[in-house]
Amino acid sequence: MKFLRHIRDWATIAMFVVLFLTLVAGIVSRYVLHAPIAWTDELAVILFIWVIFFTGGFSLPYKEHFGFDVVYDMLSLRSKRVISIVTSAGLAAVLIYSLPFVWDYISFMWRERTAALQWRYDYVYMIFPIFQVAVVLGLLRRLVRLLSPKYWEAEI
């Protein structure tokens, strides 16, 4: 497991570094050399998409995701547990239900290519179903812990 975490962390770092270097190359080529490189903007957008969904699906713990918890924080532990079970199960169900539709659309996108790099769009957006599966697995793990008499308080 530790080995997989290292791979995840290094993949995230590598994507961030390449994203940063791509942005710097685009800025330097446009404003210093006055010869813009067309593909830097496109690569930056693609890397941004991959960084966001990869990090959101694999690196960011559920408790650190953005949420509106003003009302939630005022509830009792039992109420928080019920709401957490319902929302986790609901979100997992929506993601599982939508996965075939997402896959169908992404499979259709092999026909289209990006403007500058000429990469197939199915490769560009393949991170989204990967993200969905990762989030569903995380939610199912969370549900098991929420339903466990021993671990549920740690998940709140």
Image: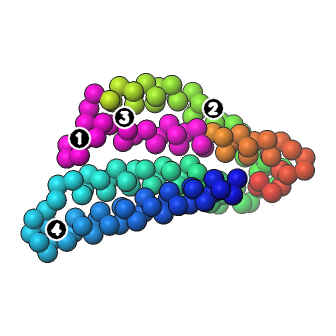
Seen in the picture, residue 109 relative to 139 is either above or below; the reply is: above
Give the residue number, with chain letter if any, for mark 1. Answer: 118
* Mark 3 residue element: helix
Q: Residue at x 25, y 36 (%)?
A: 113
Q: Which residues are magenta?
A: 111-135
Percent x, y of residue 52? 46, 54
- Is residue 112 within the magenta segment? yes
Disc ID at residue 122: 3
Seen in the picture, residue 66 relative to 148 is either above or below; the reply is: below
Residue 76 sits in which quadrant?
bottom right
Percent x, y of residue 40? 24, 57
* Mark 4 residue element: helix
- Of residues 84 and 110, the one nearer the viewer is 110
* Mark 1 residue element: loop
Q: Residue at x 83, y 42 (%)?
A: 147
Q: Earlier in the sequence, mark 3 or mark 2?
A: 2
**Could you classify mark 3 by the number of other residues whose Cα lies within 10 Å: few (under 14), some (14-19), or many (20 or more)?**
some
Percent x, y of residue 64? 62, 60
Q: Earlier in the sequence, mark 1 or mark 4?
A: 4
- Of residues 94 and 22, the one nearer the viewer is 22
**Could you classify mark 4 by the number of other residues whose Cα lies within 10 Å: few (under 14), some (14-19), or many (20 or more)?**
some
Q: Residue at x 46, y 30 (%)?
A: 102
Give the residue number, with chain letter if any, for mark 4. Answer: 29
**Could you classify mark 1 by the number of other residues whose Cα lies within 10 Å: few (under 14), some (14-19), or many (20 or more)?**
few
Residue 35 sits in which quadrant?
bottom left
Contact, CB < 8 Å: mark 2 with mark 1? Answer: no
Give the residue number, with chain letter if any, for mark 2. Answer: 93
Q: CA distance from mark 1 to mark 4?
A: 21 Å
* 6 horizontally vs 17: left or right: right
